[in-house]
Amino acid sequence: MRTCLLLLSLSASAFCAGVPYFSEPTLCPTRPEIAFVSGGDIWVVPAKGGEAHLLVSHPAEESRPLYSPDGTRLAFVSTRTGGGDIYILTLATAELKRLTFDDRLDQLDSWSRDGRWIYFSNGTNDVGNKNDLYRVSVEGGTPMAVSADRFTNEFQAAPAPDGTTVAFAARGNGDSQWWRHGHSHLDESEIWLRKEASPATYEKIVDLNGRNAWPMWMPDGKSIYFMSDRSGAQNLWTLPLGGKMKQVTKFTDGRVLWPSISYDGKAVVFERDFKIWQLDTKSGEAYAIPITLVGSDLVQ
C-alpha cells in the first residue's frame, strides 16, 4: 500500500511539474536546426539539441511544421481559421500566407522537391470522411486531386525527388493517432506508389502486415524509409525499390511518430516517448535530442 501511494505521489509530482511534450519534428535543409511542436506552438532548436525558442505562437493549435527545400519558408497547419488549414511562413520577412480553405482538417504531408507544390490529405469529398490526396501550388489556387480512390483511406503523400511518383499510405486508420499497446487490425495500412503516366499506375510495395506509414524518399529516388510495427514494436524500416525491406531501429516498445527525413537523406527525426529523436541513416544509430524550452511558461 505504501509503495502504491509513493508511485501515485511521484506521478502527481511529474504531472504538476509540467513536463513538456515534443512532437512532429522537421530538419531544416540549410541550417542545423529542427522545428517541432510543443504546447500547440512551433519551436526551433539546434539540430544537436539545446535551448529551443518559439517560432510560431498563437492561441490556436499549430502543428506539422515542414521546411521548404531551400529552407526559406515553413509550411504548417493551424486551427486559427477552423478545423485546420495550411499556412506558409516566409522566415526572412515573417509574411504569413493561408494556402487552404476547407472546413475539415487539411493534413500537411510534404513539399515537392522543386518547392512549387504542397501535398496534403483531406477527407471532405470521400465516403465516410476517408482521406484523399491533393496538391496545391505554393502561390495559392484550387487544390488538385492526386489520388482519390473511393472508399479507401489515402494519406501521408510523399512525392519522389524527380516528381514522377508519389508514395503514400493507404487503408486502416493510420492517418490518426489512435493507438493501443499491442497490435490491432484497425490501424493496419499499406504503402503504395502512384506513378505518373497516361493513365496513372499504382503499385503496392508494403503489404497489409501491421501499421505501415510515413513513407520518406532517399535523395536518389531508389529507396524509401517508413515506419512499421510489423516486427511487434514501432520502428523505422528501409526498402530499396524492387528489393527486400530491412528494419533499421531496434525499439522493443513505445511509438515512433511523425518521422521526417532530411532532404539530403542523412538523417530522420521523429517523435518517441514524448521526445525528439534523430536517426543517422548511415550508421543506423538513433538517439534522443536534449531540448529545453526557453521563453515561455511551461505550466499553464
Image (tube, rainbow, N blue to C red):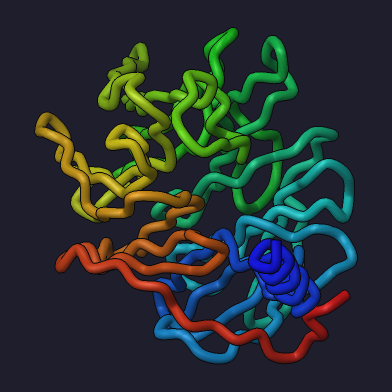
- Displayed quadrant of residue 119: top right
| Residue beneath the point at 42% across and 37% down | 213
Residue at (56, 47) in percent of width and height? 118
Residue 91 figure quarter: bottom right
Q: Position of residue 83 (x, y in %)?
A: 83, 41
In the rendered image, the vertical position of residue 89 relative to residue 46, given as above or below: above
Residue 33, position as x, y percentages in the image: 47, 80
Residue 115 appears left or right of 204: right
Image height check: is 34 above or below 74? Answer: below
The quarter of the image holding the C terminus is bottom right
Residue at the spot 46% in from the left edge and 34% down from the top edge:
182
Residue pictured at 36% horizontal, 28% vertical: 191
Please state the horizontal and vertical placement of residue 37, each as a whole percent of the image.
64, 66
Q: Is residue 234 above or below residue 273?
A: above
Image position, residue 39 (x, y; %): 75, 67
Q: How many marks?
A: 0
Task: Determine whether, in the image, residue 80 is placed left or right of residue 69.
Answer: right
- Quick one: which residue is furthest to the front in this view? 1
Q: Left of 54 or right of it: where is 138?
A: left
Quadrant location of the N terminus? bottom right
Q: Which quarter of the figure has residue 284?
A: bottom left
The answer to whether residue 42 is above or below residue 61 is below
* Front residue of 245 and 80: 245
Does residue 106 appear in the picture of this structure? yes
Viewer-proximal residue, 271 or 14?
14
Q: From where the camera sits, is residue 171 visible?
A: no
Q: Is 106 situated left or right of 235 in this image?
A: right
